[in-house]
Image (cartoon, coloured by chain):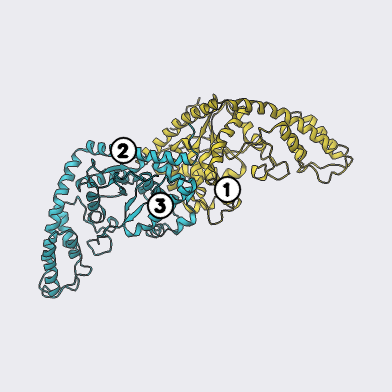
Chain colours: A cyan, B yellow
Amino acid sequence: MSQPASNAKPIILTGDRPTGPLHLGHFVGSLRNRVSYQDDYNQFIMLADSQALTDNMDDTNKVHRNVVEVALDYMACGIDPAKSTILIQSQIPELAELTFYYLNLVTVARLERNPTVKQEIVLRGFERDIPAGFLTYPASQAADISAFKASIVPVGEDQIPMIEQTNEIVRKFNRLVGKEILVECKAVVPEVGRLPGIDGKAKMSKSLGNVINLGASADEIKAAVKMVYTDPLHLKVSDPGHLEGNVAFIYLDAFDTDKAGVQEMKDHYTRGGLGDSVVKKRLEAVLQDMLAPIRARREELAQDKGYIMQVLKEGTMRAREVAARTTDEVKAALGLSYF
Amino acid sequence: MSQPASNAKPIILTGDRPTGPLHLGHFVGSLRNRVSYQDDYNQFIMLADSQALTDNMDDTNKVHRNVVEVALDYMACGIDPAKSTILIQSQIPELAELTFYYLNLVTVARLERNPTVKQEIVLRGFERDIPAGFLTYPASQAADISAFKASIVPVGEDQIPMIEQTNEIVRKFNRLVGKEILVECKAVVPEVGRLPGIDGKAKMSKSLGNVINLGASADEIKAAVKMVYTDPLHLKVSDPGHLEGNVAFIYLDAFDTDKAGVQEMKDHYTRGGLGDSVVKKRLEAVLQDMLAPIRARREELAQDKGYIMQVLKEGTMRAREVAARTTDEVKAALGLSYF
């Protein structure tokens, strides 16, 4: 009975914590997909500033500033505000309201067992001093997803337990009120997963300092490619080189559209006789070509802050209407409507 | 610098979880005081329906229904909506929003150490299955108090740790943002504290079934007084009776305005020669006299549900304006304002 009309586009919720500019890792892991989703899906892209605060209360300026920076990254990469709804989490109070009620639907023990939360607690070194907002953020994430009745949530593999917890909350709520008000969602893990950092570490991450930002200058790209990790055993050009963990080739696989050309290089490299500098030259050309128009669009957009704020305001208002409708339904079902 | 104007009345926040009709315990512990506060204080009285849900998710109807019942109790006892602001918690989304942000200012370990929370977890038999909303309700309480910038919070002795935790959050927030935005509050414990139940148990409580409701009928009052616990060793009228734990005399102390008359009875009782039935007769008369006008006013008010809803709506709107102002200040200080 609460099935969406068959001609309605499926709803996607996705987004980022605005704690720094986006980089190639985001591009491969999510941004590229979002651009392709926006024609066939009703896509909400959330700038999760409130969530970013859970572990950035000591640097709220950073979060504020990066809301606009990340929005610039989105639009520079081809997110079209006429097709996708870009919203700022903190400006939709209904998301906090839903979180508040969902906290009654999940036990402390269950939150403590959430593998994603557990892992991030270790990563951030919280130990016993876990902010309550951090432990409970699965409830907040459930609020974000369910407020928009998203049925598809693109996530990294490590986020799958979060989606399971969202669905537990959704089912528990629906069962409790005896109505199918909230919608279960499906985690979609992108085929091309995580991009390694330029240093060869498993993850490209601002905090590891191994990133190439989407807004990087030509010089920054050049310098970064020089540092790209290849095969440490490949000392002489004539030596056979190895591809496993070789970031130069991993990036070429990710970004070079001439697959046959890349394959030829790989064969040559593993046979021996192809120097790293040649591979990196090609990689640099590919990245410069790919990033130059993004950088140009980004710079152009950054000139008109008023337009960006207008896009964010309109997206947030549109999103708020949807979230408010869901919140009204949730509160009415809980007996919390009076007037 | 954020001192209130010297002619502004101090702000009080008080309220109840609407899970059942109010009884004599509430009257002694809080209602009577609220009636006397309302001339000299800016008093907000909160119907804490959201908070009641933290352990009543399985009976949301009960909470909804009792919002109006408790409001009737308030007004029947003399709470004047022209002087006090009666508000419904769930209808002020800003309270959930503040809670959401305050969760970042308190650690899980600190919440687990809160003596009030600890005790209530035991009382409710939650053990490991504590709903997250229950563990985190000190943050919610801090939101309620600070949203109205209340400086005085009348509470039972067992709630003092909650107020301490509120002040910790207030100080932490102000320190974090470097501005005195939130206001610390003071717990005020009423002189006449807790009223025992008619069975002599330490607390009059709906769940113990040892209450006399404020809306009790004359017959209910009569029946309850018959069951009032006195001195089990006082078998014959001629025996000396004991006053300690003697509920009949405790109630007379609380409600009989003729202090000298009560003292005389006490002397007679402890000397011997005064039967329980005489004491109870006097107690019944006192309670009937006291509750008859409350009951009458309650019945009259209950005829006009539209008026009650109007009072609740106006109070809630007035309170929401105040809470929204505080929330705007809090969010702006956290860098969460954009448009």
**Location of the C terminus of chain B (image quadrant):** top left
Q: Nearer the viewer, mark 1 or mark 2?
A: 2
Left or right position of A238 against B323: left
Looking at the picture, how far across and down is residue B104, in whole percent?
Answer: 42, 48
**According to the image, label 3 marks what residue?**
A166
**According to the image, label 1 marks what residue?**
B116
**According to the image, label 2 marks what residue?**
A318
Which residue occupies 34% across, 59% down? A158
Question: Residue lying furthest right in this view?
Answer: B238
Q: Chain of mark 2?
A: A
Left or right position of A272 against B221: left
Q: Which label was assigned to residue B33?
A: none
Left or right position of A19 against B136: left
Q: Nearest the camera: A40 or B92?
A: A40
| Residue A128 appearing in the image | no
Q: Nearer the viewer, mark 1 or mark 3?
A: 3
Evaluate whether label 3 is on the same chain as label 2. Answer: yes
Which residue occupies 17% across, 54% down? A220
Neighbourhood count class around disc 1 (C-alpha, 10 Å): few under 14, some 14–19, many 20 upward: some
Neighbourhood count class around disc 3 (C-alpha, 10 Å): few under 14, some 14–19, many 20 upward: many
Numbered disc total: 3
- Identify which amino acid the numbered label 1 is placed on: Thr
Looking at the picture, how far across and down is residue A148, in whole percent?
Answer: 35, 44
The Cα atoms of the two marked residues, 1 and 2, are separated by 42 Å
Which residue occupies 28% across, 61% down? A203
- Identify which amino acid the numbered label 2 is placed on: Arg
**Location of the N terminus of chain B (image quadrant):** top left
- Identify which amino acid the numbered label 3 is placed on: Thr
Neighbourhood count class around disc 2 (C-alpha, 10 Å): few under 14, some 14–19, many 20 upward: some
